[in-house]
Image (spheres, rainbow, N blue to C red):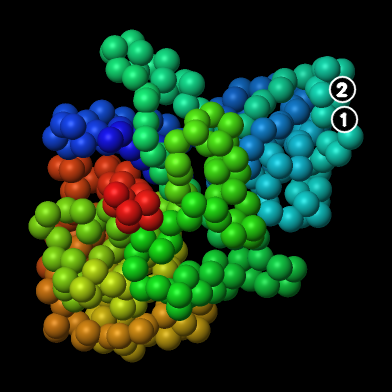
Amino acid sequence: MKILAIDIGAKTQDILLYDDSTTLGNCIKLVLPTPAMVFRKEVINSKEDLFIKGDTIGGGMLSRAVREHAKKYRVFMTEQASYTIRDNIDVVKSYGLKIVDCDVEKFEKNFKGKIINLREIDLKLLKNFLMNFNENLNIDYIGIAVQDHGAAPPGVSDRKFRFKLFSEILEKSRDIENFAFKKPPGHYFRMNSVISAIKRQTDAPAVVMDTSPDAIAGCMEDDLVDSKGPSLIVNVGNGHTVFMVISERKVDALMEHHTRCLQDPGKLENLVKRFADGRVTNDEIYNDYGNGAVIINAPGFENLKQIVVTGPNRNIFKKTKLNVYYAAPAGDMMMTGPMGLVRCIKKVYDL
């Protein structure tokens, strides 16, 4: 059985071609620039009008590059592509970007400028690369992780809406795998764009999930992580830091903050202890420019069996006095996300 697992972060896309006919150490692993970074360079290097079409992909620095380009040149976008900038068309237009709502093919044919076709999933490109090594991409399942806040209703905070969706998932089930979707809810524009892109390119069954819970699931695939716990597992990403208390492989507590707000070692250490003790509120985290917290069962800091840390900014924990274990599922920290996807695919499809 082969599973293609791709975790698409802010700066890198981490790829694992999981093959159960061999050992994990012999499976193909790649760490490449994230698609948004690739397209960002295209925008920055362009000195003409742009027509941007294609899928909804991760925005971030790409979004900023497009908005800067629009200050000097005209930028046209299809509605689907425009959700890369923001999930609200009126906000996109306020940046000076023009939405193409007429015959797109006719518009493209007559357009004088550079055309950029956004795509986050490009299996043909990956297949051609692997062919150079006499490897194929005959996969049985595919899993993709992306960050998706969800399209908040007018007047509702993006941060509050994102955490509300997380809380609703936990209300249904405390299994970490419940964050993985075969068919995402409609408010997840980017996840739905991913599923559509997959269906255009392969018949393999798929799942998509947010990168934050995906990283936690990946840590649980490290043989040295005590999933029975209670353990505190933390993913320190480029944008978000997510904390989960795991007991008996179930989520007992969840908190998500912005990494930039956790640079002070004393603040971070204090937050970890109070979170494990159940002394952190949702409003406190939101008012500190985080997303929120929900505590179902608080084990108490002194009762934690382990504090497990992963993510590109995990080194912020080295400045604290906390005793932590740095997870490396499949022997590689960069494979934390892909291993989480493999775990969730096996559970979702009962493999």
Image x and y of residue 247, in percent: 22, 75
Q: Mark 1 touching mark 2, by CB under 8 A?
A: yes
Q: Is residue 263 visible?
A: no
For residue 324, the mark is: none
Using the image as rendered, state which of residue 7 and residue 307 is in the foreground: 7
Can you say whether 9 is above or below 121 in the image?
A: below
User: x and y percent of residue 101 in the render?
Assistant: 86, 39
Q: Residue at x 21, y 53 (%)?
A: 221
Give the position of the N terminus as an image quadrant: top left
**What residue is at 54 percent from the left and 53 percent from the top?**
183
Disc 2 marks a residue whose amino acid type is Lys
Image quadrant in which you'd find residue 304: bottom left
**Image coords of residue 216 (percent x, y):** 30, 59
Q: Is residue 177 left or right of residue 188?
A: left
Pointer 1 local density, CA inside 10 Å: few below 14, some 14–19, many at least 20: few
Q: Nearer the viewer, residue 181 or 211?
A: 181
Amino acid found under the numbered disc labelled 1: Asp
The answer to which image quadrant residue 279 occupies is bottom left
Q: Determine which residue is flagged by label 1.
A: 103
- In the image, residue 289 above or below residue 259: below
Which residue in the structure is indicated by mark 2?
A: 106
Q: Residues within 10 Å of mark 2 (few under 14, many from 20)?
A: few
Horizontal and vertical percent position of residue 114:
72, 20
**Element class at badge 1:** loop
Q: Residue at x 83, y 17 (%)?
A: 109
Q: CA distance from mark 1 to mark 2?
A: 5 Å
Q: Tag 2's secondary structure?
A: helix
Q: Image point 65% across, 27% down: which residue? A: 117
Q: Left or right: where does residue 107 sit relative to residue 139?
A: right
